[in-house]
Amino acid sequence: MSSEETCANPLLLGWVQEWVDEAQHRNSKGLTTYKNAYKNLKACPIKFTHPSQLQQLAGFGPTLCARLTAQMQNHCRENGLPMPRRTRLPRDSGLADLNNQDDDGETRPARRRRNNTYVPKLRSGGYAIIVALSSLDEDSRGMTKDQLIEEAQPHCDSSFTAPTDPTKFYTAWSSVRTLIDKDLVHEKGRPKRRYTLTDEGWEVARRFQQAGNPGQSRQVSPPRMDPRPQEPEASTSRRVYRSPSPEVESKHKEELGYANVVANGDSSTESSALPNFRPIRLAPGSFSVQLVLDVREVRAKKDRDYMQDELTKKGIKPIMRSLELGDALWVAKCHDANFLPRLGSEGDEVVLDWVVERKRLDDLISSIRDGRFHEQKFRLRRSGVKNVIYLVEEISMDKTNYQNNEEAVHSAIASTQVVNGYFLKKTQSMDDTIRYLTRMTMMLKKQYESKSLLVIPTEVITAKNYLPLLEHLQQKEPSTGHYISYPAFASMASKSDMMTLGDLYLKMLMCTKQVTGEKALEIQKRWKTPYDFVKAFEACGPGEDGKKRKREMVSSQMENLVGRKKITKALGHKIAEVWADI
């Protein structure tokens, strides 16, 4: 070839040309690589004695050079020639200038390597550490680890002592190693290590100061998006590992008597049969809105107080107790503990129309499997609470396990929003959940503490008339809310107090896998009681024909329904196996 004759390395160029032709024939993805190598080798005026020297030429890497070396070895063996020795081209060969040339032959200027200073993300662990250390004088001895964590925690969204994900070990403190490696923080002293900012670290701190609040000389951290001023001691206090607060022990004793606070009563939906009463009025300023947190909401077995501690640091001191329903709710706590008892109610707390059901992603999957998911939503619907927040923490979990249950999770979330009408909130970690509960508490304080609350006296409430009474009051006064005391709420929210035969029948039906609340309601419409359902199966008769009719009894009447209410033949067989003797 004429190109090979004018090239300084015709033998090597011929082998590369063969690769180009072969790649074109096969329509290979490596065609561009081979063409680039061919073009650079053809234009190179330097003669190479060994294929390994081509690595210094643009377009050639270890793989191409290894292939050319193997070709060279075969060529020398077939022609009885000695294999050239591996040598490196001298630095003055001009190859570096050749690689820096454009296609038009002009030499490109060498690129300057930018030396960017590492700047941590806002409210990350590294950011908080730099802000905390910048509160010292530049000639200070520095801070110990405990002192630094105490100062840095208010400036960080993640915990310095507990991992965000319980399955991992990374905390915000892990960022200190990155800062040391980036020469922003200096570590000194053994065994009591102390930390100070380097000159580069002080420069980054000044950047934070200019970006966040240039009017102050020492306050480096930008203002937090928190409408409530922080308490000086609570915001920087060190975590204290303690037993549950006194409220937990005292409230636990009170809860033993909650079960009989509200009588069962007779069911009645007629407005004429509903009681007439004069509501108890709580005036603005006579109560404060407080968050009530379930004592079972723990981060880990060895870190049971994490949620309570973090909320307290943010200025929200939760009331800890074992909740009959939900994982968090809000109450209006009377300043006068005897106000409600004097007017025919109990306790000193009134339950507001907000409740949170919190689920970690792995717990959501397990609750879908064992049926707790539908049972909990059923109890939430029977509670009479208007605003239900279904909070899902999307923690990291085993990829295979999640993929196997991904469709069920999406279906459950869609059902919660569309069918039940609950508000769905997704968070990424428990810290994110804590921030959300803090914002919600602040919002509800503004919403409720400036207006009067109407409380239904407990003496007129029964487990049977409560929901019809709420519905009647809402129709009569749509813009006015009516509330009940916490003891009355806990009494009715207990698992058995409000259970009618119809409710028990629905729960019995939902014990069969794949029978959702919608399907159970459709079955109940056709067979009103468990007795009617069993008798319908018995009416199908004995023998093989009877078994066949039993298997098809439910599906034959409900297979024409649309969407989630439809029951397939396979599910009908399962129901027959449970309720009929087949």
Image: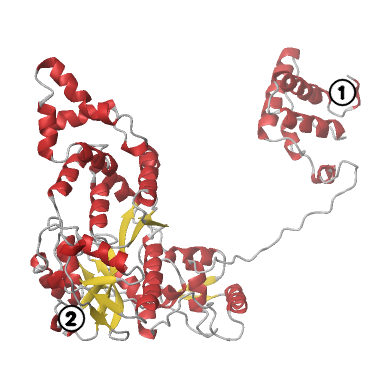
Where residue 541 sits, quadrant-wise, is top left
Identity of the residue drawn at 16% across and 42% down: 508
Residue with the mark numbered 1: 4
Quarter that holds the N terminus: top right
In the image: residue 442, left or right of residue 513? right
In the image: residue 368, left or right of residue 196? left
Count all numbered tags in the image, as a single digit: 2
Residue with the mark numbered 2: 340
Q: Where is residue 176 in the image (x, y as percent from the top left)?
A: 47, 67
Q: Nearer the viewer, residue 330 or 67?
A: 330
Q: Position of residue 275 (x, y in %)?
A: 16, 68
Label 1: element kind: helix
Identity of the residue drawn at 72% across and 13% down: 78
Seen in the picture, residue 70 relative to 136 is either above or below; the reply is above
Label 2: element kind: helix
In the image: residue 530, left or right of residue 443? left
Residue 377, can we see it?
A: yes
Q: Position of residue 154 (x, y in %)?
A: 43, 75
Q: Which of 205 and 397 is in front in this view?
A: 397
Hey, what amino acid is under mark 1? Glu
Quarter that holds the C terminus: top left
Q: Nearer the viewer, residue 452 or 40?
A: 452
